[in-house]
Image (cartoon, coloured by chain):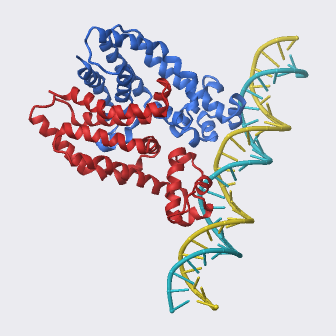
Chain colours: A blue, B red, C cyan, D yellow
Amino acid sequence: MVKEQGAEHRILEAARRVFIRKGMAGARMQEVADEAGINKALLHYYYRDKQRLFEGVFKGSAERQFTCIWRVLEECDDLFEGIERFVATYLDRMLEEPLLPQFLISELNRDPKHLLEFIDRGKAGRAHYQKLFEQAREEGRIIDIDPRELLVNIMALCAHPFIARPMLTHLHGMNDEAFRRMILKRRRTVPDFIIRSIRA
Amino acid sequence: MVKEQGAEHRILEAARRVFIRKGMAGARMQEVADEAGINKALLHYYYRDKQRLFEGVFKGSAERQFTCIWRVLEECDDLFEGIERFVATYLDRMLEEPLLPQFLISELNRDPKHLLEFIDRGKAGRAHYQKLFEQAREEGRIIDIDPRELLVNIMALCAHPFIARPMLTHLHGMNDEAFRRMILKRRRTVPDFIIRSIRA
DNA sequence: GTTGGGTTTAACCAAGTGGTTAATTTTGCA
DNA sequence: TGCAAAATTAACCACTTGGTTAAACCCAAC
């Protein structure tokens, strides 16, 4: 409802909130308009139709997410350091926008063709990961493990608590603050968990 | 479209498929009717409205999932064995119904009050897990780690490949068969990964 | 001030939605 | 065979939905 910063941008921000909350199918154009504090017709004036508005939101969210996560890896020159910083960055980023991974994954499952555009955003980061991995492997510092599987495990340990958050919090009787504390603790414990497992 | 086994049951099965594919918000009653091969009015004859039909599907899916997963744990009397069998059972179950976790989690995020009913289904299993954990801890066979966090990690490593499947398969250029092989491989590698990490 | 183009709105529309109803068919059984 | 109850359907309805339109508004340049 904030009136600053131009209608077009305000619409996109409102749409981001609504789409992330309700998903593409559950979101209503009227709700986006209300949240942006403008007339519904203005949505179509700037973004044609629901699909294009959604794509604007999705593309922006996905790109920001991926670049942010992978960039930090490129700054590292050691696998263990890379894992530590990757996990910490991922968790910090998720604390800022906890509903984002669930949103991205949910929409990606519903319509996987969104991937084509933005997935290459982390190409350089992934190549660098491969390099760090091989280096550590050659130096005999890690056990024999499929690098792709290790990557899956890292992502899983980072993302899953956010994706399964309601189940988790209910299971362990956590409130929002307790969840936050748990995530902050995981900034240390998750890298430990991973590195203990792969260290030769 | 199979005509056997009574309309009521056929409707529920069709609804399960449609809801899991499209989610509550995206599913259409007409689509359920078509998939069940019956008239749309019959849905309301047996299940009143969309919400109740959805709850029938959700409750059934969630209960089956949880009981199936936790039961196997109760049959074990050692933590490491428990982890191995839990992971294997979880992955086998997911291979049968790969879209289920994404569905459950997605709807749970949209409306967390579904939890209240079925989450206690795994109560006995979780209590047994706690016992196995403490036993292994007292015998000095595992390091000092929060048992709840270990549980989160186990679930994460099992569920995440399925939840993030489209991202994963696209990232690594996998087809369905390659994905399946990867999961079957993980029946061994995931328990190894976990146990290596927690063994004292 | 007038004018003209970009912006914003209220009113409207057609299609699709979940849900109802009343009539028809099928079934169980005396 | 007849008949009442259950099952099934076609037709319908009120309402929501995404999307359009034409008019109003704003504001800088002339």
The C terminus of chain A lies in which quarter of the figure? top left
Side of B83 where A54 appears, left or right:
right
Q: Nearer the viewer, residue B80 or A88?
A: B80
Front one among B139 and B105: B139
Residue A161 appears anywhere in the view = no
Residue A22 in percent (x, y) is at 53, 40
Which residue is painted at 33% across and 42% down in the image? B90
Pick the front one: B58 or B190: B190
Q: Is residue C10 left or right of residue A101?
A: right
For residue A10, above or below residue A137: below
Q: How many marks?
A: 0
Residue at 61% from the left image edge and 64% from the top image edge = B41
Q: Which of the 4 quarters of the picture holds residue A80?
A: top left
Q: Position of residue D4 (x, y in %)?
A: 57, 86
Q: Position of residue B121 (x, y in %)?
A: 31, 52
Q: Is residue D9 above or below residue B83?
A: below
Farthest residue to the left: give it.
Answer: B139
Residue B35 visible in the snapshot:
yes
Please tell me which residue is depicted at 48% across the width and 34% down the height of the picture: B176
- Nearer-the-camera pick, B61 or B118: B61
- A95 lies above or below A22: above
